Amino acid sequence: MTEDKKVIMIDDVEYTEDQLSDEAKGCLNHIGSLDQKIASTQFNLTQLQVGREAFMQRLKQELEK
């Protein structure tokens, strides 16, 4: 039975998990978590911007009355 090792590419160099120190693995975990938070924050920012645009449009319509 062969074991599939996870390969990580950093600066065009491939590493397998068993080549990484515990510190390096910890850094990868933090990077993954931060990437998720960045994506979530970007999603939230888009929602906020669209919401602001909608309220600006409603304000303009109200001022036209």
Image (tube, rainbow, N blue to C red):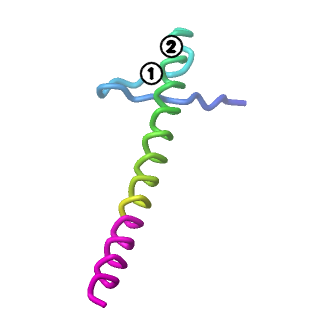
Label pair 1/2, CB-CB below 8 angstroms: yes
Q: x%, y% of residue 2? A: 67, 30
**Residue wearing tag 1:** 15
Tell me the residue at 37%/64% (across/down): 52
Q: x%, y% of residue 56? A: 32, 71
Residue 20, disc:
2
Q: Main secondary structure of the magenta part?
A: helix
- Image: 48 above or below 58: above
- Nearer-the-camera pick, 29 or 60: 60
Q: Amino acid at mark 2?
A: Leu
Q: How many marks?
A: 2
Query: For the residue carrying disc 2, how many other residues have a C-alpha within 10 Å: few (<14), some (14-19), or many (20+)?
Result: few
Quick one: label 1 or label 2, which is nearer the N terminus? 1
- Nearer-the-camera pick, 48 or 42: 48
Tell me the residue at 43%/41% (across/down): 38
- Image: 33 above or below 16: below
Tell me the residue at 49%/47% (across/down): 40
